[in-house]
Image: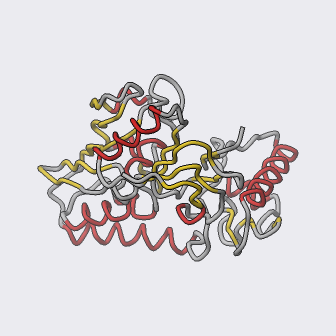
């Protein structure tokens, strides 16, 4: 393992903003990930784990300690309707692989540019499906450096939430996940459904510009994007960050945006919706380096 100092993190995020990592490690397998954990622990350094960086806003001042990027830890094993996928496996790729086998249950994942680890952490979902629907077990690294398996029921899943974010499992890291899919379908039918969901996402969301995906959680029974659009905030811009003109719950980088630009747009949107409706929009994007 190499631990590189002062590495820019913007290129490791889908928003393309953010400062440097004090140290960066990019393990290629679970053994190297554990080694990186031990390296940081021996030096009393804080550790931040990131995957595809598709749901992150990293502060312009960067992150102290060791940042571990898991996107090279890939692989998936398919057997009898279950798939065990490594934490860095791209969700889009896994969704297509399941579709090719005629396995149903992950079609919604084709529009989410994240990793399996991020999917579990966020209870990611889209278009009527989510991680909690298909997850069986998760292999994790505990704060004591032990590798153990926990069940989906222990994750306390809720809308875009798991116990890995807050609560008893907050400092646990996802190493791999086992998913249960439905089998016996015509592969061409599952491929068609997956293609339809892929097309729906790419025609209604601004994939042509850097973004972090949906910025705010939907405040039931409302949709965050609808509230923002009704407030006339589509196209609202600070610096080079803009509320997307295609989907109001996306903030896009027009080129050269800073994390501060994005954050200031977020705060303005929150203030506007609160003033108009008394609803505080809670971020879905994970803020790193912010107090």
Q: Is residue 217 visible?
A: no
Residue at 47 percent across and 55 percent down: it is 126
Q: Is residue 19 visible?
A: yes
Residue 225 image position (x, y, % from top left): 68, 57
| Residue 112 shown left or right of residue 268 in the figure | left
112 is higher (above) or lower (below) than 36: below
- How many numbered circles are shown? 0
| Residue 172 shown left or right of residue 56 in the figure | left
37 is higher (above) or lower (below) than 25: above
Q: Residue furthest top?
A: 168
The residue nearer to you, when weighing 227 against 260, is 260
The residue nearer to you, when weighing 35 against 150, is 35
| Residue 261 shown left or right of residue 77 in the figure | right
37 is higher (above) or lower (below) than 256: above
Residue at 60 percent across and 46 percent down: it is 286
Q: Which of the 4 quarters of the picture holds residue 252?
A: bottom right
Q: Which of the 4 quarters of the picture holds residue 261?
A: bottom right
Residue 145 image position (x, y, % from top left): 35, 29
Q: How was this image coloured?
A: secondary structure
Quadrant where the C terminus is found in the figure: top right
Residue at 17 percent across and 50 percent down: it is 81
Q: Residue furthest right?
A: 275
The residue nearer to you, when weighing 73 against 216, is 73
Residue at 35 percent across and 28 percent down: it is 153
| Residue 104 shown left or right of residue 269 in the figure | left
Q: Which of the 4 quarters of the picture holds residue 99?
A: bottom left
Residue 216 image position (x, y, % from top left): 65, 50
Residue 128 image position (x, y, % from top left): 45, 52
The residue nearer to you, when weighing 75 against 4, is 4
């Amino acid at each position: 393992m190499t631990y590189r100092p002062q590495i820019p993190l913007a290129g490791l995020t889908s928003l393309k903003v953010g400062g440097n990592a004090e140290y960066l490690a990019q393990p290629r397998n679970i053994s190297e990930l554990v080694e990186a954990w031990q390296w940081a622990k021996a030096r009393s350094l804080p550790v931040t784990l990131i995957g595809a960086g598709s749901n992150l806003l990293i502060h312009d001042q960067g992150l102290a300690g060791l940042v571990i990027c898991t996107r090279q830890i890939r692989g998936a094993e398919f057997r009898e309707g279950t798939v065990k996928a490594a934490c860095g496996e791209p969700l889009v790729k896994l969704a297509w692989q399941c579709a090719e086998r005629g396995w149903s249950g992950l079609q919604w994942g084709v529009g989410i540019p994240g990793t399996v680890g991020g999917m579990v952490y966020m209870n990611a979902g889209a278009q009527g499906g989510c991680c909690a629907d298909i997850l069986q077990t998760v292999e994790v690294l505990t704060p004591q450096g032990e590798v153990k398996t926990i069940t989906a029921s222990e994750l306390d899943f809720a809308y875009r939430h798991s116990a890995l974010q807050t609560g008893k499992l907050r400092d646990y890291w996802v190493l791999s996940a086992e998913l249960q899919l439905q089998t016996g379908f015509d592969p061409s039918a599952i491929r068609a459904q997956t293609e339809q969901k892929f097309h729906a996402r790419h025609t209604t969301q601004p994939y042509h510009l850097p973004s972090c995906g949906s910025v705010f959680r939907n405040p039931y029974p409302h949709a965050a994007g609808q509230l923002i659009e009704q407030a006339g905030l589509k196209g609202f811009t600070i610096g080079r960050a803009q509320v997307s003109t295609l989907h109001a719950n996306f903030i896009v980088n027009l080129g050269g945006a800073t994390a501060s630009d994005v954050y200031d747009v977020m705060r303005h949107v929150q203030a506007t919706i609160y003033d108009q409706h008394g609803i505080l929009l809670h971020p879905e994007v994970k803020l790193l380096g912010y107090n």
